Amino acid sequence: MSLLWHKFAIILKFNSFFMISIGNTIISDDIADKFFVCDLNKCKGACCIEGDLGAPLTEDELPIIENYYSKIKPYLSKEGQDVIEEKGLYILDSEGDYSTTTINDRECAFAIYDKGILKCGIEKAYLEGKISFQKPISCHLYPIRITKYDHYDALNYDRWHICNEACHHGRELGVPLYKFLKGPLTRKYGADWYEELTLKIERKD
């Protein structure tokens, strides 16, 4: 599932007393304390269509998407293919950040409908073994957002009303956010980093 960026809603601050520091990362307490499990049957993949911009992209993801696009393209909608042909695979905004192109300034050009639920065409190509890139890390990590500073990354939980059902679902199942996102957190920072995060959260408890 890809993810549109409601950019003006994520001015990130560490207002909490408890924070975790691991290497060059600082993690907010919400990531340890909040419960979260995506419930696509309820939200229908709304994060692929809601927001001000497309899915945030890192600079090292740009050539990856460019190189794989010929294999990703068959999985996309006609509208997605057309807007990419017209505007390109990604845009650079006024603040110097890259994000995926959108259709009519709404859904991500890489989003596809699957039985009424928006999913990611990049991920579908990955799951079918066509490419080795799963999807943008910003999508994989959501609702964690990373703000990069000169000497460290700040990891915050991004609250968004469209994910209310995921919060309820997570509480019902008793799954904290950091456990739900074990895979993408490990993908981003490595298994040792994730193990240290788990240990520090458990010691806090």
Image (cartoon, grey):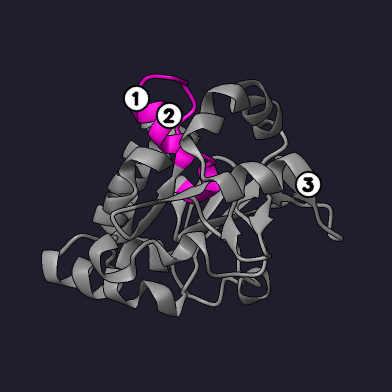
Residue 13, magenta (yes or no): no
Which of the 4 image quarters holds residue 18?
A: bottom left
Residue 126, magenta (yes or no): yes
Residue 166: percent from left, percent from top: 29, 68
Which residue position holds label 3? Answer: 87
- Visible in this render: residue 119? yes
Q: Nearer the viewer, residue 170 or 162?
A: 162
Which residue position holds label 2? Answer: 125
Magenta residues, as a range?
121-139
Amino acid type assigned to the residue bearing label 2 in the image: Ala
Q: Nearer the viewer, residue 186 or 125?
A: 125
Amino acid type assigned to the residue bearing label 3 in the image: Lys
Residue 205: percent from left, percent from top: 23, 63
Residue 86: percent from left, percent from top: 78, 45
Say if mark 1 contacts mark 2, CB within 8 Å.
Answer: yes
In the shown orientation, is residue 1 left or right of residue 77?
left
168 over 193 or under it: above or below: below
Which residue position holds label 1? Answer: 128
Identify the element where label 3 is drawn: helix
